[in-house]
Amino acid sequence: MKFGKKRTFLLIFSLIFIAIAGCSRKEETATKNQPQSLESTKQVDFLNIRHIPENPGDKNRFFYSDNGAWYGFALPPENEESFIGGFVGPYLIDRKEWISRQLLKLVVWDAFSGKRVRLKLSNESYPPGYLEQKLEIDSLMINLALWFATDKTAFLRTELKNTSHSFKAIILGLEGSVFSKNATPQVGDERIEIKLKNGGKFIIKPMEGSLYTTDYFVDGNSYLIKKRRMNMLPNLRFLNFFIISYVENENQWQREKAENRVMFHQPEKMFVENKKRWKNYAEKIFSSGAIWASNGEYQRIAMKSLITLMTNYRSAKGALKHSGIIPSAAVTYFGGFWAWDSWKHAAALASIDGKMAEKQIYAMFDFQNEAGMIPDCVFPDAKKNNWRNTKPPLAAWAVWQIFGATKDTSFVKSLYPKLLKYHRWWYKFRDHDGNGLCEYGSTDGTKQAALWESGMDNAVRFDDAKMVKNGDANWSLTQESVDLNSYLFAEKNYLAQMAELLGKNEEAKNIRAEAEDLKQKIQSMMFNEETGYFYDIDLNTKQIIPVQGAEGWIPLWAKVATAEQAGAVKNVLADTNKFATFVPFPTVARDNEKFSLDYWRGPVWLDQAYFAVRGLKNYGYNALADKFTQQIFGHLQGLADPKMPIFENYDPLTGKGLNAPHFSWSAAHLLMLLMDK
C-alpha cells in the first residue's frame, strides 16, 4: 500500500446543546391546549430513513438533506454494527445515484496500544435538522452529529468527553469507501477528494488551522484520514469537525470558503444556529393557534411534513436561478420544479420561512416568456423544460399568502406585473370563443399536454374532450373548466388587492369588475340546480359535462359560489356515496362508474382535500370541515408513523398510500390544514 501524508488541525470549543424534540403522544381527538415545549418533550424520529444502498442505482430511497443541498445521507438499519460511527451515503440527488454505502465513518485507536477501539452504539436518531449517533468506549462518550451548513457543505461534528477519573489518550480518524464504478478517492492538498466520473467532487477534510498533524491515505476505492494523538484529561471535553463539501470544481470550492468564513472558523456556532432554525420552524407551526397545532399526535405529523418539504428543498443550480422544492427526491423522475406544485409549496412555507417561499415563486417566474406563459416544469438543464403546457393559475394566491405572513410590499411590487401578465395570457391563449370562460390547452395541440395543464392528468371529466386550435402554438380542450375559471376568479381578487396595496386603485377597480362578471358566468352557467353541484361545460353547447369531481368544489375555495350553491355542494360532499368516503374527497365521486385508483380517477389528493376543507370554512361549515380534517389526519395510513412516508395520493376507501412517496405538496397541504391556513 502506498500512502500520502498531509498536516492539519483540531479545534476545541465549548458545547452548547439545544434539543429539538418530538412530542409525547396524546389522544387522537384534537384538544385546545398549550403548544408542547420542544425542549421538554421526548425526542423521537419523525421519519424513517434507515436503509443501505446495494448499488449506485438503488432507487426510491429517502435520506436526510437540508439547506437546499443536492446530496443527502441516511441512517443504517438498527443493529448494523459495521455502520456504527458513521452514516449511510451520500446520495447525489442531481445524478440520482449513491456514491457510497458509507463515506463517513469515525475511527478511534487507543494511543498506547495502537489498536483500533470497538465503538459501542448507545443511541442513533434523526432529530429535526441533523443526524446523530451517541457512542461509548469504556468511559469515553462520543456524540456524532451530521448537519448541512450550506447547500454545498456539511459538517461531521464529534464531541468527545472523558467521563472517568483517569487520563486517556486516543487517536481519531475518518474512513470510507466508494462504489468504484463512478467515483475515485485520491489524496489532495490536506484533504481527501472523491472525484466523480462525469465531473464534480467531494472534499473531505478536518478543519483548518490545527496544531495537530493529520495523515491521509488512499487504497483503491477506500480512504483514511488519521489525526495525531489526543490527550484527554478527566472530565475534559473536545469538539472536532470534519468538512464534507460537494462542489463542481476547485473554483467553486474556493468560493464556498470565501463566502462562508464564519462557518469554516466557527462551526459550533453554525451548529447551534441550525438547531435554532429548526426549533423556530416548529414553534411557528405549534403556535399557529389552530386546534390541531397544539396536539401532540398532530405535531408529529406536522414535523414529518416539514421534514419532507425541507428534504425536497433544492438550491439554485444550472438554469435554476432560485431555490425551490421538487415534488419528491425519493423518485428519480422528479428533478426540477413544477408550476402549481411551486405555488402550493410557497403557500405552505409562507408563515414558516417567508424568504424561502419567495424564492420558490421567483424560481418559476424566472422562466416567464414574453407572452406571459409559465412553463409546466423547469430543470437545471433548461433543455428538459416543458413548454407544451402550463399549470393551473395559483401563483397570485401563493404570493398573497406570502405577503400576509411577511408584509413584504417590495416582493408584491416585483411580482405584480408578472402575475398580471400571466393572468392575461390565459384570456389571450386559452379562451377559444372569447366569452370570458377559459379552457385548459396546450402549445403543441396534443390532448395529453392539455390534460397535464389541468394538473389532473387522466381525470374522468376529460374522457370525451377533443382539441381545437386557437392560433399558432395555441390549442384548447373542448370544455370550459370550472376549476380553472374559479382559480382565475380568485386570482382577479388577489390581483385587485395587490393593485390597491401598490396604489393602483383604478386598475384594482377594473379587475374587480372583471371578477364580478366572471362570478356571474360561473354561477349561472356552471352550476346545476338539479344535482346541486358545479361542473365543466361543453365549449360549444354550454351544457354541463355530468362528472362530479374535485373541480366542483373549487368554487367554494375561490368564494365564487352563492350561499345557496355552497350549501348544495356541501350536501354532495357530505354524501357517503360520493365524497364522504373513509378518507374524504376522492377526485371523482365514489358512485361514478369509472371510479378507480388510477391517479386522478379516484384517489384522494391532499391539495384538493385542502381546497374542499377551506371551501367549506369559507361558507361557515366549520364543524363539517373539522370533521373531515380529523378524518384525513386519522385515516391516512401511517401518517403518524415515522416508518411510513407521506404519499402522493391515497386510497379513499382504505387510506393506503399510493404512487410517489415523500411527496412535497401532500406535506405542504397537511401543514396548511394543521395550521388552519
Image: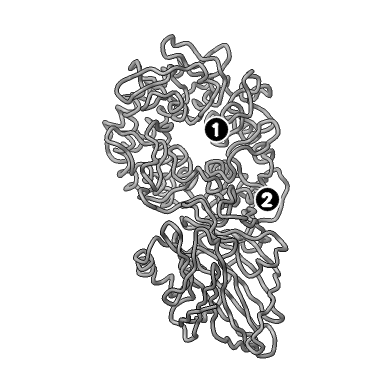
Residue 608's mark?
1
Q: Residue at x 57, y 81 (%)?
A: 238
Gap in Å between the C-alphas at discs 2 and 1? 25 Å
Q: Residue at x 57, y 11 (%)?
A: 530
User: Who comes first in sequence, dot 2 or dot 1?
Assistant: 1
Question: In percent of the image, x 35 and y 18: which residue is there?
Answer: 469
Visible residue check, residue 164: yes
Q: Which numbered circle lies on residue 279?
A: none
Mark 2 lies on a secondary structure that is: loop
Q: Residue at x 70, y 82 (%)?
A: 139
Do callouts 2 and 1 mark residues in contact (Cβ within 8 Å)? Answer: no
The answer to whether residue 571 is seen in the rendering is no
The chosen color scheme is one colour
Residue 370, quarter of the rendered image: top left
Where on the picture, by quarter, is residue 252? bottom left
Q: Is residue 608 above or below residue 151?
A: above
**Compared to 225, does 346 lie above or below?**
above
Residue nearest the observer in this picture, 278 or 248: 248
Q: Residue furthest top?
A: 541
- Residue 429, placed above or below residue 136: above
In the figure, residue 433 lies in which quadrant? top left
Q: Point out the image quarter for the N terminus.
A: bottom right
Q: As rendered, which of 232 and 386 lies closer to the eye?
A: 386
> Can you identify the residue that label 2 sits on?
643
* 483 displayed left or right of 171: left
Question: As shown in the figure, which amino acid type bears the numbered disc 2?
Answer: Lys
The percent position of residue 605, horizontal first and vertical second, equals 57, 34
Q: Secondary structure at mark 1?
A: helix
